[in-house]
Amino acid sequence: MSVIYALATPPAQSAICVFRVSGDGCLAALPDLFSSQLDKPRFFYKTEMFNNKDFVDSVVVVFFEGPRSFTGEDSFEVYAHGGLAVMSKIIECFDAAGFAGAEPGEFSKRAFLNNKISLSQAEAVSDLIAAASKDEASRASMVLSGEFEGRIFDFCGRLDALRVLVEGEIDFTDEDEVFVDNLSELANDVSRLSAEFSGFAGSCSSEQGNLNKPKVLLAGPPNTGKSSLFNSLLSRDRSIVSPVAGTTRDLIDSELVIKSMVLTLGDSAGVRDTDDSVEGAGINISFDEIKRSDLVVLVFDELTLASVPFFRELLGKQEHVFVFNKIDICDDRPEGFDLFVSAKEMDGVGDLRKILSAKLSPKHNNSDLTFLVRKRHIDIFNKVSARLDLVSSSIKSGESLDVVADNLKTCRDKLAEITGIKTSDELLGEIFSSFCIGK
Ligand SMILES: Nc1nc2c(ncn2[C@@H]2O[C@H](COP(=O)(O)OP(=O)(O)OP(=O)(O)O)[C@@H](O)[C@H]2O)c(=O)[nH]1
Ligand SMILES: [Mg+2]
């Protein structure tokens, strides 16, 4: 295979950047590229990189001899200073050496083609990198560890055992040999397999990022400090704060991480009667968002207590937290509030985070989900489940065993597409093109 290279770290100024190079013959270029003699694979060498006698950077290099490398090919990695100019000098250097820029996912694709990892493991590498929460990362790791594939292989083995029985019965029907002596037992075996498979499929989810990401909305009357509290929770000035009532007109949202939970936090327009059509449109959005949110944080101050009953009625049974803000300028602690804070002084903001976490995590934990998989896997699971149901009903209704055998074969072939044992070039191209470059 040709020699490919890619920047494996983001193309942005940073302490270090890492380049990967892979492909047969790439190690022959090492003496021209680096000043030190690199003898041993898997050792880090501090050396200097040159582009045809022009100094490029002081770098660290490690090389791997295939098949003992990520891709299974000869490869090496360069750790350089993370400046944009350094990166472009290294790219020039690799271009001059005749290396080609890698396509997205090309390193993982080569690892798969060289049997270093399975297709689902290659996909899990990509998902692990994209994971936004600890939960997603651990579910992607479960796939990467091979556990997911072990389960698929187990189902394949059990399908094979059923196929041997059914196909044996078809092929040797005229002979004395008995493969299936009781059709209803066969139907039961298929039903059991189908139920277990559905249970397994239920422990997989393809949704990433949005998976159970709860929506929390800051709402209430104008000027109570919703945007100030929004910014305090995010620890940055994302929403405009001003003493003018009706500052926030649109819905503003951002991701907020509390412990290992990622949630969407929204800041909304303060609700009041208004003749301003733009503000009115914003207020309508606030009403809609209140209904769509998993938890509404109602923010009041001393001047807006009269509207508390209106909001209580509006929320009904919806999950909510009543917050009284601006305690730095008010000593009263009115009844009926869950929390007293000062967004300005960051007083009580930590307690609000704790309340959000406590109210949301029991409903939004994914402990029953084990594997983070791709949408294509879910599509395959649905097809396999439907076929298995068909198999058991066709046995029960006494249909020809040829139909049963055919459906079992389809299930088996579909499952093989998950691990990549039977996958078309077209599908491979589609899968790896969704990866990012350098992976
Ligand atoms: N003293 C004090 N002032 C606050 C506090 N929180 C917000 N304010 C002030 O209250 C005013 C309104 O704050 P915002 O955060 O814009 O209020 P809002 O609820 O988003 O207002 P609208 O978007 O107009 O509905 C600003 O002048 C803030 O500086 C606080 O904890 N203490
Ligand atoms: Mg606001």
Image (tube, rainbow, N blue to C red):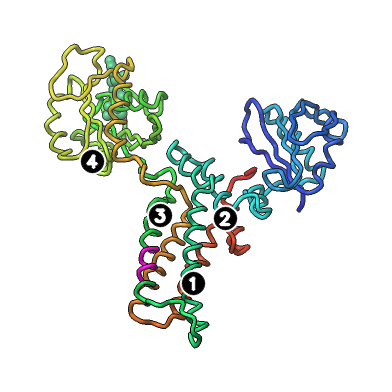
Amino acid type shown at disc 1:
Arg
User: Which disc is residue 200 wearing?
Assistant: 3
- Which of the 4 image quarters holds residue 16? top right
Of tags 2 and 4, the one toward the viewer is 2
Residue 191 belongs to magenta span: yes
Give above or below for 174 relative to 209.
Answer: below
Query: Tag 4, which secondary structure?
Result: helix
First in sequence: mark 1 vs mark 4: 1
Asked whether the beta carbons under mark 2 and mark 1 sit within 8 Å of each other, the answer is: no
- In three-dimensional space, the C-alpha distance between marks 2 and 1, rounded to whole angstroms, equals 30 Å
Coordinates of residue 267 in the picture (x, y in percent) = 32, 33
Depth check, front residue: 103 or 361: 361
Mark 2, ligand 2, within 8 Å: the answer is no
Q: Which of 143 and 235 is in front in this view?
A: 143
Establish if 143 lies above or below 184.
above
Mark 3 Cα within 10 Å, few/some/many (few <14, many 20+)? some
Q: Name the residue under label 4.
A: 287
Residue placed under numbered mark 2 in the picture: 431
Q: Quadrant of ligand 2?
A: top left
Give the secondary structure at mark 3. Answer: helix
- Cα distance in 3D space between marks 4 and 3: 40 Å
Magenta-colored span: 187-194
Residue 174 at x, y percent in the picture: 49, 88
Report the mark closest to the observer, 3 or 2. Answer: 3
Element at label 1: helix
Q: Quadrant of residue 403?
A: bottom left
Question: In the rendered image, which residue does mark 1 sit on?
Answer: 163
Mark sitting earlier along the chain (3/2): 3
